[in-house]
Amino acid sequence: MGFRPAICSASPFCVQSLSRLAYNCGTSLEPLAKYCSAQDFDCARAAERLGEAAYLDVDYDAKSGQAIFTSFDQRSPDPDGWNDEIQPRWNSTKTETGVFTQQQTSESEELSFAGYLTVVSEDKKPKQTRFSFPSRHHPASGSSFLVTFPKPAGLHPTLRLTFPTQVSSPAQDCGLYTHLTLPLSFFVDKYQLSSPNYLIANNLQGIRALSGETDLEAPEWVIRKWGSTMLLELVHHTPHGARLESMESRWHVNIPLHLRYLPPREGGATSVNIPWPIVFWACPAEEGVDLNDNPFDRVNLGYEALFDPATTFYHFQPQPREGGGRLMERVQVPVMDLQESGWVESGTVGVIILGALWVTWEILRVSLSGWERKKRTSMPKKVQ
């Protein structure tokens, strides 16, 4: 595993468009290479390798106008193993590199690494180094989940989280949460998720945060934002340290979503993509633990700011179905069929014309009826 940082110049406009880039580019990160200057070959080479990354973090410094891309690799891009040539980019720049392996620790909240550090072009040989520090993020031991959409999805699809086994809280006072990133095609109805009976029936406790585009009526083509995010607290039935053998193993969480009106297509159906949510325990850190000492800490992920800074997270492992490793669901949904839209247009025009004729006839009928009554009342009566 390894980190690859690359610093590239970028304008504020380019960085603001990165949120849309994540949805529009699919699995390709090649467009990021255009944010490097033409003379910065190291940046361009690093950007080209981002396509192999397991995840990518982007930090933008508004004062310097620089975007820092940090990628994480689960495996070497070279089939023969890690074989990187690292050279100082400028004479005034200090380049330090290290090779570490993770060590066993006695504390569950700590990470420990041992290995070698060296300063390129300064040190004659690597220096042995060992360090440990509290970590904000941890894997939830033995916990995984699966995402599905029961068919037919329709205009009101349900995102189902399936947990193969019962889960036990890793510590006292922990809460079970899921954080969803919804592209602009989807939205949630916060009023629907405020019904106590509905929440209990679907193993939900309620919305804890909702931001982004939440207009319930706007079609997709008029929305300018990229979408919305939602933090949901889930119900869990097993306290810390509980025995799980006697409990039903498989359980589900159903999250109701809604589709906006999408542009019409031939065939009357289209596919929309939605990324998998993340599922995690949020637990208060032990008193006196400083989580800011971790040099590999990942912050500003979109959900940890919703919790107290002294919070540790235990993440569930997503389990994609066989034949696919992408944490993205493709949902088939109905739209207006362009081949049938002619009948709709003709029928709409016909109904409008018939409606106008009916209104006109009613107005004329009332007017004629009133004129007849007025005419009869104004005629002189015969005197016998």
Image: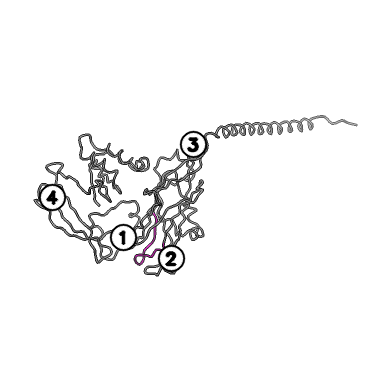
User: The residue under label 2 is which amino acid type?
Assistant: His
Q: Is residue 351 left or right of residue 43?
A: right
CB atoms of marks 2 and 4 within 8 Å: no
Gap in Å between the C-alphas at discs 1 and 4? 33 Å
* Dot 2: element: loop
The image quarter containing residue 130 is: bottom left
Q: Nearer the viewer, residue 295 or 323?
A: 323
| Mark identifier at residue 237 | 2
Give the main secondary structure of the magenta stretch.
Answer: loop
* Image quarter hosting the C terminus: top right
Residue at horizontal 26 percent and vertical 40 percent from the top? 48
Q: Residue furthest front?
A: 80
Mark number, residue 119? 4
Amino acid bearing label 3: Arg
1 vs 3, front mark: 3
> How far apart are the alpha carbons under marks 1 and 3?
46 Å
Give the labeled residue for mark 3: 265
Question: Which of label 1 and label 2 is nearer to you?
Answer: 2
- Return the x and y of residue 54 as percentages of the image width and height: 30, 49
Q: Which residue is mark 1?
A: 312
